[in-house]
């Protein structure tokens, strides 16, 4: 072989290896210098070849490694260009980006995730005190809840339930013990909400809101000493019921569009004149606990036209605490959220004067309101709504599996039909994913992390998974799920689906704008650094910071291009995986897709720049890739933490195949809609050199998951752990569990009766009558007949639905009272 060709080949292979392994630039220079020296010394090439080679070497590496030279020749020009291209950013966008921190999402954005780091993260566990609370007060509260009574008759929790919640300090789970709270971990907080949600969504929402985004957490993190000492003990004891008013008619997720305002002024307060305060005008809606709250947290824009606080007139967003009995506060009316009658309603006020010390955190915190909210939003996104969704998934898994085994069509349990098994598999698989993501995220929160991008991911995907799971459960239950009444244990979960999807940031915007839009800046190793450098008022310091970031970024992108191609060509065999033989392929493929994602993100930001923010569907697809990288990471971690039980392996495989398939389809859809077609074609070859790589879970895998839900045992119990299982004999869920055990006991006996009927050996037209005939004919024993009758009675009780007399069909007694007053027409 020609020495020069060999030399070029060695250089090319070395460059690929160095880029793949991300060797530093000085090592590139050293190795290529050694190779060029060896080529020059041992092969005696022509001077006309040697001089250009050495010139190329020097022209590349000297400017790159001599930092002052690099800054003057290259970085200064790129710095000026970047300043021109960087899209304008509003204050609320900047504060949202700066809120929270990054965690495992940064590893997924790196193109080279450190799986050992993930697997070494501590497994969150409940303390003895927390477990005792779940086994005691939470269990007792669940026994007190009659969801039909709450949702159809009272449209509220009964007074004794409200009192129990206050006495047992359910509203104080996050408040420190020295203020009288329970000071529970995020895991315990989530476990309480999850268990309650499997009994009553109304009760779960009532409990979760004071422990989520609201006065409690805002006071704990930002309140003055005086505010904490006064309000936190009162919140802990239930003497104060809090709510937080953010959303208004004109602005939901867009805080910049908020119409509520306050004017710094002086006025009268408690008989004192000339008190420095604020005249606040607001109109809020959708405020949970608002109708019964005694303490109103309020967000509004603050202005100082008289410059009583300083030179600025527009002071930004402020947060204040206002007792609801304060003059001018209008509160108490209720919304009616889809037959899930938790207390929710509007409130407003016009030129309500409040003293300055009612601002959360005092005067020093004025203007920091949006940042404060963004930093606390992770609790609602990361704890409460995922707990609600996971509880629904576990409840649907347990009840739908049982019902599908009990309910028969054509003398066969419907769970044996492949069409039904497809739905059962999705219910079980998504429930396992939800639990995995819930626990992993809670672990990060309990370690002091505030991963804002990850909490947005699980808020979106777990509430959407709840939508899918509950819809599937309704389909399997058929008419049983449709008819409202005390026997219907699914309908309220079904009606609550839009609640979780809408609150704490509507899912459409979360997917299309937040997950990737925020993640691309926060999780990328260099983009935020570049933006901060450009915004640095010290030009020299900014240029130095930008120089380090931009060249790190260039090397990062080159590495991911090479890694994407080589991992695609090798089907990810070139990367390492943890020593878990059964799951190793998933770790490798996720590394491959992480590299592809990082490359696509960089190219999209480079080519589209600020326009990417407006290309919401492209941004959403990249967000989907990041999301599924996280969700399958959580599944793998959860499986490892539980000791990798063999019975759960099918759930891991189902999620692994599903997530990789969805990642693939999101990438393909992204490239199909990328505006530069030639580049899209090249990128598709880089990522999938042999075409699409991943397929959806197959029918056999669906069947195995369905069997897990249909069969009582350790795997089913582990999947549904943490929900409430009633012991009351008349309860619909108790009847379901009881019937399942009884039906299983006669599953070999009942087919004998049916077979005899088909052969004409038994003349009875119904199975119930055929049991008596078979007993009389000596085909079965007395005990077998008794067992069959008990099982069929239990089955019949489960499949029955509620019906009502005409006079029971008025809407509510309250509405009918209004009807008698002529305000509305009664329903007959």
Image (cartoon, helix red, strand yellow):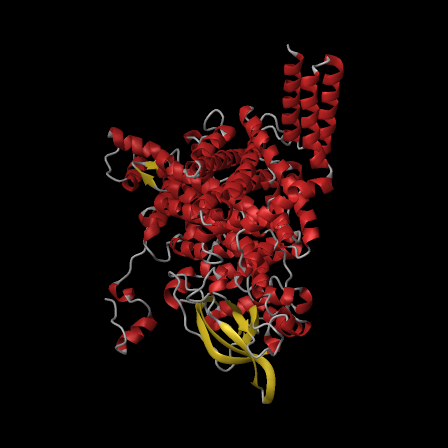
Percent of width and height locating residue 744: 42, 38
Q: Is residue 725 above or below residue 221?
A: above
Percent of width and height locating residue 22: 66, 33
- Can residue 225 be seen here? yes
In front: 267, or 337?
A: 267
Q: Quick one: quadrant of the C terminus?
A: bottom left
- The residue positioned farthest toward the top in the image shown: 1
In front: 680, or 520?
A: 680
Percent of width and height locating residue 392: 46, 50
Q: Quick one: quadrant of the N terminus?
A: top right
Q: Is residue 697 above or below residue 265?
A: above
In front: 296, or 204?
A: 296
Describe residue 357's horizontal placement relative to residue 725 as left or right.
right
Q: Is residue 572 above or below residue 500?
A: above
- The residue positioned farthest toward the front in the image shown: 48
Percent of width and height locating residue 203: 48, 62
- Can residue 704 be seen here? no
Q: Quadrant of residue 525?
A: top right
Q: How many marks?
A: 0
């Amino acid at each position: 072989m020609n020495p020069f060709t060999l030399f070029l080949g060695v250089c090319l292979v070395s460059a690929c290896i160095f880029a793949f392994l991300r060797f530093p630039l000085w090592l590139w220079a050293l190795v290529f210098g050694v190779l060029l020296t060896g080529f020059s010394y041992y092969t005696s090439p022509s001077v006309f070849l040697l001089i250009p080679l050495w010139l190329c070497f020097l022209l590349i590496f000297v400017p790159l490694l001599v930092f002052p030279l690099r800054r003057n020749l290259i970085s200064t020009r790129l710095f000026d260009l970047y300043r021109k291209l960087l899209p304008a950013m509003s204050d609320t966008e900047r504060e949202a980006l700066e809120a929270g921190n990054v965690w495992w999402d940064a590893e997924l954005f790196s193109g080279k995730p450190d799986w050992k780091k993930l697997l070494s993260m501590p497994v969150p566990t409940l303390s003895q005190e927390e477990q005792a609370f779940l086994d005691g007060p939470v269990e007792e509260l669940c026994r007190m809840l009659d969801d039909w009574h709450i949702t159809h008759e009272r449209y509220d929790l009964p007074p004794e339930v409200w009192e129990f919640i206050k006495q047992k300090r359910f509203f104080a789970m996050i408040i420190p013990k020295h203020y009288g709270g329970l000071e529970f971990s995020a895991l315990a907080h989530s476990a309480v909400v999850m268990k309650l949600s499997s009994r009553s969504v109304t009760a779960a929402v009532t409990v979760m809101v004071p422990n989520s985004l609201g006065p409690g957490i805002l006071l704990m993190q930002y309140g003055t000493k005086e505010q904490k000492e006064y309000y936190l003990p009162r919140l802990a004891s239930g003497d104060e019921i809090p709510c937080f008013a953010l959303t208004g008619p004109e602005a939901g997720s867009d805080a910049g569009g908020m119409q509520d305002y306050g004017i710094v002024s002086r006025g009268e307060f408690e008989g004192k004149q000339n008190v420095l305060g604020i005249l606040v005008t607001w109109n809020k809606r959708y405020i949970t606990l608002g109708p019964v709250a005694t303490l109103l947290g309020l967000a509004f824009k603050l202005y100082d036209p008289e410059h009583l606080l300083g030179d600025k007139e527009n002071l930004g967003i402020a947060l204040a605490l206002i007792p609801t009995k304060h003059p001018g506060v209008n509160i108490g009316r209720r919304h009616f959220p889809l037959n899930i009658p938790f207390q929710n309603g509007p409130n407003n006020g016009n030129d309500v004067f409040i003293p300055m010390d009612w601002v959360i955190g005092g005067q020093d915190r004025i203007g920091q309101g949006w940042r404060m909210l963004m930093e606390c939003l992770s609790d609602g996104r990361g704890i409460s709504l995922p707990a609600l969704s996971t509880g629904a998934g576990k409840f649907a898994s347990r009840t739908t599996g049982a019902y599908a085994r009990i309910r028969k069509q054509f003398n066969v349990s419907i769970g044996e039909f492949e069409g039904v098994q497809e739905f059962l598999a999705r219910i079980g698989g998504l429930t396992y994913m939800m639990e995995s993501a819930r626990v992993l995220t809670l672990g990060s929160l309990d370690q002091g992390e505030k991963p804002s991008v990850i909490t947005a991911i699980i808020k979106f995907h777990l509430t959407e998974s709840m939508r899918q799971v509950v819809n599937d459960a309704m389909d399997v239950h058929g008419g049983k799920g449709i008819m409202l009444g005390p026997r219907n244990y699914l309908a309220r979960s079904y009606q609550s689906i839009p609640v979780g999807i809408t609150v704490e940031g509507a899912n459409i915007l979360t997917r299309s704008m937040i997950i990737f839009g925020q993640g691309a800046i926060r999780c990328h190793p260099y983009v935020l650094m570049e933006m901060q450098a450009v915004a640095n008022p010290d030009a020299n310091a900014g240029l130095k910071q930008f120089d380090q970031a931009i060249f790190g970024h260039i090397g990062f992108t080159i590495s991911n291009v090479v890694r994407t191609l080589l991992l695609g060509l090798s089907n990810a065999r070139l990367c390492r995986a943890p020593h878990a033989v059964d799951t190793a392929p998933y770790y490798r493929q996720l590394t491959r897709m992480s590299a592809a994602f990082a490359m696509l993100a960089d190219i999209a930001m480079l080519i589209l720049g600020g326009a990417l923010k407006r290309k919401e569907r492209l941004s959403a697809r990249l967000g989907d890739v990041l999301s599924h990288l996280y969700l399958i990471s959580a599944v793998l971690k959860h499986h490892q933490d539980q000791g990798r039980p063999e019975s759960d392996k099918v759930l891991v495989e189902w999620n692994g195949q599903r997530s990789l398939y969805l990642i693939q389809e999101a990438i393909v859809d992204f490239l199909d809609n990328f505006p530069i077609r030639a580049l899209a074609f090249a990128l598709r070859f880089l990522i999938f050199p042999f075409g699409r790589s991943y397929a959806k879970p197959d029918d056999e895998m669906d069947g195995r998951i369905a069997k897990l839900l249909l069969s009582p045992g350790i795997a089913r119990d582990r999947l549904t752990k943490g929900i409430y299982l009633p012991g009351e004999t008349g309860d619909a869920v108790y009847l379901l569990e009881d019937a399942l055990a009884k039906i299983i006991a006669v599953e070999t006996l009942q087919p004998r009766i049916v077979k005899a009927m088909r052969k004409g050996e038994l003349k009875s037209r119904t199975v119930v009558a055929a049991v008596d005939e078979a007993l009389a004919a000596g085909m079965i024993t007395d005990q077998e007949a008794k067992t069959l009758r008990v099982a069929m009675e239990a089955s019949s009780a489960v499949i029955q639905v509620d019906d009502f007399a005409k006079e029971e069909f008025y809407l509510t007694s309250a509405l009918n009272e209004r009807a008698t007053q002529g305000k509305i027409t009664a329903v007959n």
